[in-house]
Image (cartoon, grey):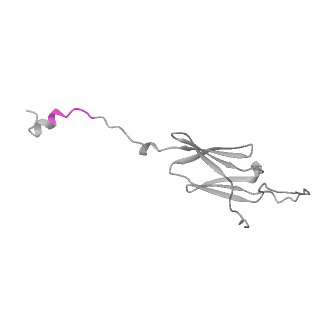
Amino acid sequence: MAQRPGRSLSPYDIEVIDENRYAITLAVAGFARNELDIQMAKGVLTVRGRKDAAKSDRRFLHQGIARRAFARKFNLADHIEVTDASLRNGLLVISLVRKIPEAMKPKTIAIGEADVALTRETGQGE
């Protein structure tokens, strides 16, 4: 079965580092840093790989390492930001953090004593 151009077979992991930090690891064997592109737009993280079109005199008896272009998209939850990306040993690791705005974080409201003037006006507390 022929593989459609741009279709991704890159295996990946999504790891929980702690309560607000995550990592996406993609297997990108054979791709150099300059052949990978990471973009974030409207809550969608897109990772693309494109091999340089340079011809090689290499001859293969078997060619099992994928050298075709790929694209992988991840829909990220609200308030998730990409903080870093690194490439090591054929693995692309993208670090993510959840940053909830202060206005959206739960607040604890202190409960105080009833105002004495208020209880006199309503006829309560006497």
| In magenta stretch: residue 116 | yes
Dominant secondary structure of the magenta stretch? loop
x%, y% of residue 99? 51, 43
x%, y% of residue 122? 11, 40
| Name of the residue lying farthest toward the right | 57
Question: Residue at 15% across / 37% down in the picture?
Answer: 118
Q: Which is more toward the observer, 97 or 10? A: 10
Q: Is residue 93 left or right of residue 17?
A: right
Residues rendered magenta in the picture: 111-117
Q: Which is more toward the observer, 109 or 74? A: 74
x%, y% of residue 72? 65, 57
Quadrant (top left, top right, bottom left, bottom right) of the N terminus? bottom right
Question: Residue at 68% across / 54% down in the picture?
Answer: 10
| In magenta stretch: residue 41 | no
Vertical side of 15 occupied by 8: above or below: below
x%, y% of residue 41? 59, 56
